[in-house]
Image (spheres, rainbow, N blue to C red):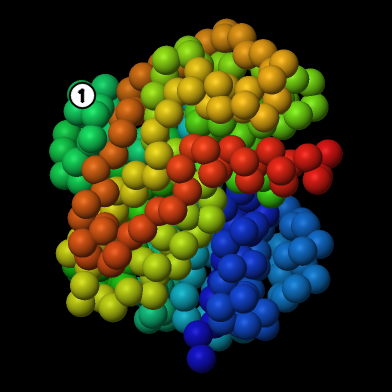
Amino acid sequence: MEKILVIGCAGQIGSELTLALRKLYGDANVVASDIKPAGKEITESGPFEILDVLDTHRLFGTVSRNKITQIYHLAAILSGNAEKKPIASWHINMSGLMNVLELARELQLKKIFWPSSIAVFGPTTPRSNTPQYTVMEPNTVYGISKLAGERWMEYYYQKFGVDTRSVRYPGLISYKTEAGGGTTDYAVEIFYEAIRNKKYECFLKEDTALPMMFMDDAIKATIGLMESDASHLSLRSSYNVAGISFTPKTIAEEIKKHIPDFKITYKPDFRQAIADSWPMSIDDSVARKDWGLECKYDLKKMTEIMITEIKKKI
């Protein structure tokens, strides 16, 4: 029987991934953890522990006590916030991953999932249909830490046989958890502001195209990769996953179909430079070939669901 530890269960990805894993493996077999308290849906549906991934003794104790076989390590400082505190963010993002990898090596855990990001790409990367293998020269703290993390993931697989698996998430869009400090967070904020105030001031230019993914597709991709036979995987750094690409102007026009008097204005901030260094679209053909990646949500379908579900919440 698999016993899974989710580190960072209170975040945007972790909150939904934890529940999906509990549905698949059973509530008692998925231990949720975070440095801060999680929501009732997490804490009341299965085991939950307060855990700082930088605390190696507590991490070892949690894994040993619960007989953990797999870890999903999601805790990180995201792109926008990382630029404000670069040294602290590098320490948290890298030391956390290294602690998990070392623990997996020592205890011979079965599988490790750690998310990378489109932030690994930089201004010298081809921006349209960015391939799996290309120039990677990130110029943000978040991107640098993710690129280093990818190399460590592959290193631990090649040198120590740790079964490491990863995807490069694009911007993730969900109605269940509000934005958490990323450059693509406008695509979540815009729905909440459209419903609350019928207006939104966007921190990116209207024509800034970025790859995004609806959370349901991201969860499906994550579990799909982890469930795949190891023999099918051709790489152990991190897989491109594409989702859908759009601009603030495009998503605003789609929202107006549901909220006709919605208005958007633009006031680019420091995150514009980050977005300009990232791909506009992604080639995920390797993931589709290796483990059957499939995304079913387009902009129209995602917008309908986001507006319907957020209206129920607020």
Classify 258 as above or below 221: above
Identified at 28% across, 78% down, the residue is 229
Pinpoint residue 260: horizontal percent, then vertical percent: 69, 20
287 or 249: nearer the eye?
249
- Give the left or right position of residue 69, taking residue 38 as reference: left
Residue tagged by mark 1?
Answer: 124
Give the amino acid at mark 1. Answer: Thr
Pinpoint residue 74: horizontal percent, then vertical percent: 52, 55
* The quadrant where residue 119 appears: top left
Identified at 46% across, 43% down, the residue is 298
Classify 248 as above or below 53: above
Pinpoint residue 308: horizontal percent, then vertical percent: 71, 43
Label 1's element? Answer: loop
Crowdedness near tag 1: few (<14), some (14–19) or many (≥20) residues, C-alpha within 10 Å:
some
67 or 283: nearer the eye?
283
Identified at 59% across, 68% down, the residue is 20
